Amino acid sequence: MLVVMQEGATEPQIQAVIDRLVALGFAIHRSTGVVHTVLGGVGPMESFDPRDFEVMDGVKECHRIMSPYKLASRSFRPAGTVVKVGDVEIGGGKVVVMAGPCSVETPEQISCAAEIVAKAGATVIRGGAFKPRSSPYSFQGLGEEGLRLLRKAADDNGLLVVSEVMDRSQIPLVAEYADILQVGARNMQNFNLLRELGNTRKPILLKRGIAATIEELLLSAEYIMAGGNYDVILCERGIRTFESYTRNTMDISAIPIVKKLSHLPMMADPSHGTGRRDKVLPMARAAVAAGADGLIIEVHHDPDHALSDGAQSLRPEQFTLLMEQLRIIAPAVGRTI
Amino acid sequence: MLVVMQEGATEPQIQAVIDRLVALGFAIHRSTGVVHTVLGGVGPMESFDPRDFEVMDGVKECHRIMSPYKLASRSFRPAGTVVKVGDVEIGGGKVVVMAGPCSVETPEQISCAAEIVAKAGATVIRGGAFKPRSSPYSFQGLGEEGLRLLRKAADDNGLLVVSEVMDRSQIPLVAEYADILQVGARNMQNFNLLRELGNTRKPILLKRGIAATIEELLLSAEYIMAGGNYDVILCERGIRTFESYTRNTMDISAIPIVKKLSHLPMMADPSHGTGRRDKVLPMARAAVAAGADGLIIEVHHDPDHALSDGAQSLRPEQFTLLMEQLRIIAPAVGRTI
Amino acid sequence: MLVVMQEGATEPQIQAVIDRLVALGFAIHRSTGVVHTVLGGVGPMESFDPRDFEVMDGVKECHRIMSPYKLASRSFRPAGTVVKVGDVEIGGGKVVVMAGPCSVETPEQISCAAEIVAKAGATVIRGGAFKPRSSPYSFQGLGEEGLRLLRKAADDNGLLVVSEVMDRSQIPLVAEYADILQVGARNMQNFNLLRELGNTRKPILLKRGIAATIEELLLSAEYIMAGGNYDVILCERGIRTFESYTRNTMDISAIPIVKKLSHLPMMADPSHGTGRRDKVLPMARAAVAAGADGLIIEVHHDPDHALSDGAQSLRPEQFTLLMEQLRIIAPAVGRTI
Amino acid sequence: MLVVMQEGATEPQIQAVIDRLVALGFAIHRSTGVVHTVLGGVGPMESFDPRDFEVMDGVKECHRIMSPYKLASRSFRPAGTVVKVGDVEIGGGKVVVMAGPCSVETPEQISCAAEIVAKAGATVIRGGAFKPRSSPYSFQGLGEEGLRLLRKAADDNGLLVVSEVMDRSQIPLVAEYADILQVGARNMQNFNLLRELGNTRKPILLKRGIAATIEELLLSAEYIMAGGNYDVILCERGIRTFESYTRNTMDISAIPIVKKLSHLPMMADPSHGTGRRDKVLPMARAAVAAGADGLIIEVHHDPDHALSDGAQSLRPEQFTLLMEQLRIIAPAVGRTI
């Protein structure tokens, strides 16, 4: 903890900061410069709010030295984490591709999707059974029936299953059918949900919230890991910016940044990241070129009649083409597809 | 629904859009300009995704004509809604002030807070029993015991109670003690929670998410109203922008915008909106000057020892001063405090 | 300068940072904590780039201690600056209102505008002769003839003149007619222009860029002041955010923040800040309630036929009403209008 | 032009909009729906402000049908533009790499840089002679002497030269030495500069402003093209968002979007786009994978002693490695390096 005092801060102001640091259990080091006094504090923990000091009289600014997350930080496992699910390794030498429709709609639709993505080289099928929709009047998902259909389609095609849990109460049900539990962007800071997921033993795919900083993403991973579940896979899926041509702005730079700050695998979701089918291929290629450990992509056998997110779902032939392009790119980062 | 075709769109491309509109049940009107063809569609409902058309070949852009929310729109109740809770009217001639600590901590603390805010003129006490904290290592609230203490402190001082529900499962418990149920910014798009709140008969204080547009805020209100609960109070509490001096950027303009688009009362939370005690007074004054129907403000008898958000909690004498300033400003907008 | 080393940084990495600090003339203080080593550097100046250290091996983060601006900081003149132009004092007890049309269009238009705003209580008339327009096909201003008309209208009504310089080469011309030279938001970081304005002896109204942090605004003021011109007036006029209902999001909190960090007067421009006439009154009131030293507002006698920015120009009767509302609000912050 | 009236708009309100459209020369088509009346206007030009209509009574929203830019739009040259400078073609089958130091510092430095980048495969050298620096106390460039050194180093190594003009008055000087004139992000909306560049016959490298939408970037290109200079090369270099780990957030999706909306070549600047050396390689790879026509990259033979932007300058061996990686990636998008 470093507290920088303002130019001209008075001795009583400095003393008040010292007293407060001491009360919190910090050992203090004071450094008096020509212009600014700086107080360094070393303590047993850093779960305090730096703003408490920033609003004190005479304080210019305050910096936390230790990261607020520990288990999620790279220094916790410098070699990096490989999450193993069945035969699939996320974070290893192979870029893992998860693909499938936005929502499970019918037995035919999901079975058809599974065939397409398996054939093109995906190893995990995605599909929503519970859909968070911003309008109360939109299709909300098939529920358990959707999960059952998804599982069957996966098994028939030798795929694993990833599906979203929207709520703490849905965990047991989704965990029964899915191999990987997904936390959507809107739930990235649903702390009750995160805490509960820490108690499961299924890998968690945690998507970055549209307004979440990278530090906040890692803090949310920390919530899950603090409960004992270390199999967390992170995922960039677009942040909200002033640019409105695409629904979100996909932050490709988050991929190398997270890889540096954390040992956890980092994937990318170009479908939600752009919201437009015609931008999914370039952004998927960019993500792999930037070092992503995997992709999660929406594919539908007939996107024009999809019940949700058809506009961002690839047609089968586009997905096949993408996989071919990725096979060219992956070696540039020492990977295969 | 308006679909604008690109310059040079071909007749088959135009026809494909028309076919799709017809299949969705729209009656079509075609207008062929010198450069662009525009297709207008009138349908029984507008719960479709405009992006489905935007990604079609030959389409330049697509505009929804009808607002995606209906019950929350101003045209539903042009005269505006006044939410009545006991003797308090939110959305009427009086600016309602809700105040109290971030978290309920001890019996003495909450009772002291209640006395302070009641004496200065607040009519509702706020206080969290369940706290969404971004770090798993921070204080998480007292739970039901906190609610009990809050209720007692309120009753002893003739105040109403507002408190946050973090999760669908907490609704019955919080509803037992609080007069108004608060949905925090992080839960603004927790649709399962919103839907359930539509079935309660307590007023809901719905805070704007830090990355939520005004339209999304109104869509979240629509979720609650669609369930039959029309007593929704909206609240601006800061959005995330590139400016990092304050935690959030409080969007004061959202106040007059929401008042124009919707009939629902619109409040402001300058404590979370700024995150710094020294900015709360100016922003609270600004909110009332801009036409806010109420304020929710963090006040603590001893902010330096608060267990959460002390940095943004007003000291008692600051709150008293603020109330005096607001009494001067309110008449400029035809209100009283 | 504070450099925080990563957990596990090696001794050679630490030494490399020390060597570089020493080479730049810093006196070093090293503090070795349990987890992190922190290096404090005190130097004769701080015009270096902290990123140079942040990308060094083993470095976690780097913080500048001294503000990058000096002349613009509050500590340079703790009592605050009052800019005097004729009888008008900006930054004193009176909130100064500058008003007038976006562009000077005709002799009748500007003379009519001058009468309206003078009568309602404004003391400075605004009006553009050179217009920065985002489309090359839009009206670009009357040039010198516009300045002449503006000056005459001002003189006839006992007003001062503020007008924009778009380019270094326009300074002598605009300075001949105007009392205050305005730098528009798009030019806030036109450093050649700023440097040249440092050599004039006219007060400068410096508007915040739509993507400028408050620190960058103060650095731009520093450019002007470094040349010897200390009469800089700052102005908030909206920043770019994800919310698209208004053209910009007016950052009212910038007003109290700038007043704390700097001694310079801080105004607000609710016309550009919102871009919509119907939001100008609430935001103008909010700015004064938050402590603004002045307002600059677009007023047109017939906005429906204005050649530029008619949509954000007040009608005469709206401006008169606003001035009445402001007279009620100003005393709440110890000011008059 | 499409004007959507509010639900319940009165006949006089509708008539007022029609009258105004007619006065502007629009032919009107009225479509009266069950809920909303929509007015379509076809006119000879669209250089009006849609907000003029949006603030009229009874208006819900207003959409421009025609793009505000014409010469820059894809439909103006559907096959795409290839800018030819000497032997180099930008926008063709080869991804063009421009590289070199941020600033020209000494004869040795720039000559060394030229050798390095030429050997690794770059065809254009970059280097600033006039530097826009946010602090008045930073190194501001060598001026004409820098241009002379840059030209010589280029000629000695068979390279072309790109260098920045900060101001209208610098055009003749920079044009004397450089093959391509660069407009920096801060000047993207310096309309006087853009207009003047329309009169030169040198290609212009136009960088996107940090808060500029893609539409605004294309409008700025239109300014240059309207003057008769069609050789405009666009460049993404990072936008400002809430994420502060990197200086800017590089918007990779802007690459495919611009390629669709415009016929102009689109490059990427991963050095400014990230501000950190360790993120330049991944982002440069991502840009090429997403379809960029070229890259502009900062390379310095000794970044630790660079006078500006050393933190984002690649070391020689990093640049060489990057070129090798790009050679693997380019075929995935049908290009070579």
Image (spheres, coloured by chain):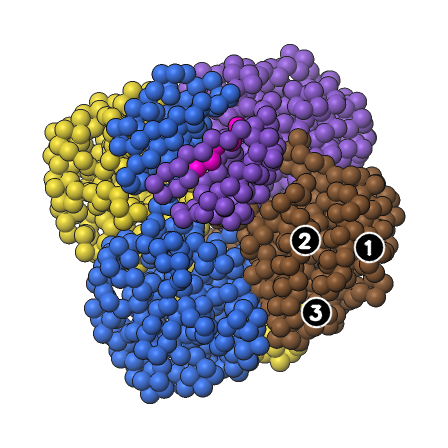
Chain colours: A blue, B yellow, C purple, D brown
Q: Secondary structure at mark 2?
A: loop
Q: Which mark is residue D337?
A: 3
Q: In the image, is residue D176 above or below residue C237? A: below
Q: Are marks 3 and 2 on the same chain?
A: yes
Q: Chain of mark 3?
A: D
Question: Alpha carbon of mark 3 to alpha carbon of mark 1: how far?
Answer: 19 Å
Q: Which mark is residue D154?
A: 1
Q: Magenta region: which residues? A: C38-42
Q: Chain of mark 2?
A: D
Q: Secondary structure at mark 3?
A: loop
Of the two numbered discs 3 and 2 in the rendering, the one whose residue sits closer to the viewer: 2
- Give amino acid for label 1: Ala
Residue C277, magenta (yes or no):
no
Task: From the image, give the main secondary structure of the stretch colored magenta.
Answer: strand
In x, y percent, where is residue A207? 39, 61
Residue at figure coordinates x 72%, y 44% from the top left:
D103
Instruction: Please say if the residues under marks 2 and 1 sit with CB atoms less than 8 Å apart.
Output: no
- Left or right, D125 with respect to B284, comes to right
- Give amino acid for label 3: Ile
Residue C40, magenta (yes or no):
yes
Residue at figure coordinates x 48%, y 66% from the top left:
A292
Q: Give C229 or D43, whichever is nearer the viewer.
A: C229
In x, y percent, where is residue C71? 60, 22
**Residue B154 appears in view:** no
- Left or right, B271 with respect to D312, comes to left
Q: Chain of mark 1?
A: D
- Left or right, A54 with respect to D119, comes to left
Q: Which mark is residue D299?
A: 2
